[in-house]
Image (spheres, rainbow, N blue to C red):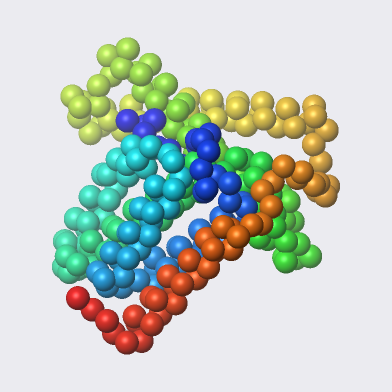
Amino acid sequence: MLNNLTIGKYYPVNSKIHDLNPTFKIIATLLFVISVFLTNNLYMHIILFAFLLLIISASNVPLKAYFKTIYSVKWLLLFILLINLVFKVSLTTSIVMVLRIIYILWYTTILTLTTTPMDLTYGLQKVLSPLKKIIPVNRIALSLTLALRFIPTIFDEANIVLKSQANRGIDYKYINLKGKLLAISSLIIPVFNLTLQKADLLSDTLEVRLYDIDSERKYSNYNAVGVFDMLYLISHIIIIILIIINGVLKWDI
């Protein structure tokens, strides 16, 4: 189950979304997240959902990759829904909250599935470049990229440890709460150690290659800005404008 998560993984395939300039993709992601939080009625959620499906279709990534992400957090989504109902939050508001999480997860998945680590780092550096006199842009961009890419690594390692525990007869379905807590603690420690080992290996690799995180570097193979990049970004801006107009005019269904 843990290997269902697709956030942080790159899916190599030819598509219009893959060919987008990484800086524009990151800006579009931020605009989409803003749109999600500005949307507060069902009418605009239908528009957002249709817009999201259009992007997913254009990515040429199998739909099951996106549904795997939602499946991996299904219990969290159910828990949020139940907690809201327990505290007498309206069903509509609870559903909207869950939808917001799903939209953000899906769009983040689109970003990582269609963007290589190098392009993602480049895009983050460009987005943060206006702040380079205040913050270490290169370090932050690399740290965010590595953190995102380590998410599937952590889950893969956890999956390996879980299979190892299953081979030793540990089954979470048939043990009591105390046993589950002990089993989980025995899961966290080896996963943490394995992840640290991979991080050390990556650090050694960068050191051997004389990688200087603070040096200015040029990316010769990043995608140049084209007409589709501009249209893609404009479409996200139009969505935000529609949401704002909807909020002012109080359209509802």
Check the image and report above or below for 56 versus 250: above
Q: Quadrant of the C terminus?
A: bottom left
Check the image and report above or below for 244 versus 100: below
The residue positioned 60% from the left and 60% from the top of the image is 227
Of 33 and 207, nearer the camera is 33
Please tell me in which quadrant of the rendered image residue 155 appears: top left
Of 192 and 241, nearer the camera is 241
Of 137 and 216, nearer the camera is 216
* Total numbered circles: 0
User: Percent position (x, y) of residue 163?
Assistant: 36, 19
Q: Is residue 72 left or right of residue 31?
A: left
The residue positioned 33% from the left and 37% from the top of the image is 64
User: Percent position (x, y) of residue 210?
Assistant: 83, 33
Is there any visible trace of residue 94 in the rendered image? Answer: yes
Q: Is residue 133 left or right of residue 146?
A: right
The residue positioned 31% from the left and 70% from the top of the image is 44
The residue positioned 66% from the left and 48% from the top of the image is 223
Please tell me in which quadrant of the rendered image residue 245 appears: bottom left
User: Percent position (x, y) of residue 8?
Assistant: 50, 40
